[in-house]
Image: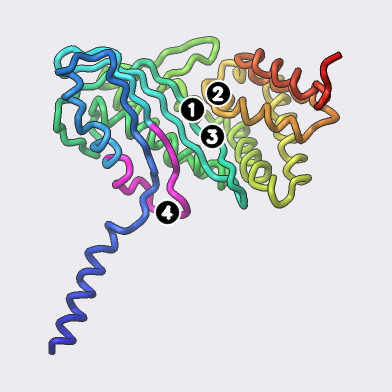
Amino acid sequence: MKRIFLLILITVALQLRGPAARAQELDAQVNLNLSALSETDRQTFASFKHDVESYLNNYTWTTNFSGERIRCSFQFNIVSGNGSDYSVQLFVTSSRPLYKSDQVSTMARFFDANVQFSYYRGQELQHGNNYRSLESVLDFYTNIILGLDYDSYKELSGTPYFQQALTLAIVGTAANGNGWQRDVTSIGTYSRVGYIEDAMNANNRAFRSLIFNYHYSGLDMLSSKPELARVEIGTVIDSLVSLKRQSSAAGRSVYLRAFFESKYPELSDLARLFPDNAASYFLKLGYLDPVHQNYYEDAKAKALTPSGGDGQ
């Protein structure tokens, strides 16, 4: 009887332990810059880092996630406070490992200067579909991170997470939340609503498919099949150029602009794959991503400078 009772206890313990031990999707790190706040306001944020990391890391965001947790960071620069209302600059990044490599690729790199939320010390963060000034921003960027990650492993498989982000944007807009306005610009300036509407635009599916090829058939093959990876990456760049030439809207795409914002150092480094056509390669990058034209020009100059020379 004692042995049976012990087995029952072990079984129950394992059942209780199971869900808590299940790997979650995010490995998020939260950082805070409180230098602009008074000492009293700084005390308000004493548990903020822990609470937000728990909110992001201990919640199950998907039903079919597998593999390593997605490494990401949320940097909060608290600009000012008025009672329990705070104006914030938020910098969000995420990355994913490359297949059979110790290298990673940056997937998300967003700077959101238009974040405002209410927060008081010890506030309990809650998941749900209702608009909440802090949680809705966290949920939005989490779903963007998931959508980008899924899209890089299977073509267009990030759509459910982009759709959830779009729903959050619609709810935020309806609630007249700060930063959820539907800003229309002609140069692809970043906004939450502009980005997610652009990502979900049917006209951009071709871009999303190419970006899948770039990661799955390009970057992921660099270590095991470098020649195939080189050909695929070159094909993706050429196809992006062709699509931009065919679509006047591509130059205003917030989605594409955000892609290059996360990838421009990586894309510059990949010029090493095209030693005989580096000048042409950088010319294409400059056409696709004029915002970082100066960066590409500097990278091109270094790539075309003979190694070991003294420049004379």
Instruction: Inspect the image, locate mark 4, and give the three-letter code of the amino acid beneath it.
Output: Asn
Q: Secondary structure at mark 1?
A: strand
Between marks 4 and 3 in the image, the one whose residue lies nearer the viewer: 3
Q: Nearer the viewer, residue 295 or 253?
A: 295
Q: Earlier in the sequence, mark 2 or mark 3?
A: 3
Residue closer to the observer: 99 or 136: 99
Which residue position holds label 3?
106
Relative to 55, say whether 112 is above or below. above
- Type of amino acid under label 3: Thr
Q: CA distance from mark 1 to mark 2?
A: 7 Å
Residue type (three-letter) at the residue carrying disc 1? Arg
**What is the x, y in percent for residue 13?**
21, 69
Residue under the point 22% across and 64% down: 16
Q: Is residue 211 above or below residue 57?
A: above
The label shown at residue 261 is 2
> In x, y percent, where is residue 150?
50, 44
Residue under numbered circle 1: 109
Residue 29 in view, yes or no: yes
Between discs 2 and 4, the one toward the N terminus: 4
Point 28% across, 15% down: residue: 87
Residue type at mark 2 is: Glu
- Rendered-image quadrant of the N terminus: bottom left
Q: Is residue 291 above or below residue 65?
A: above
* Disc ID at residue 64: 4
Residues under labels 4 and 3: Cα distance?
Answer: 22 Å
Label 2 – label 4 distance at C-alpha: 29 Å
Which stretch appears magenta? 55-73
* Residues under numbered marks 2 and 4 in contact, where contact means CB atoms less than 8 Å apart: no
Helix, strand or loop at label 4? It is loop
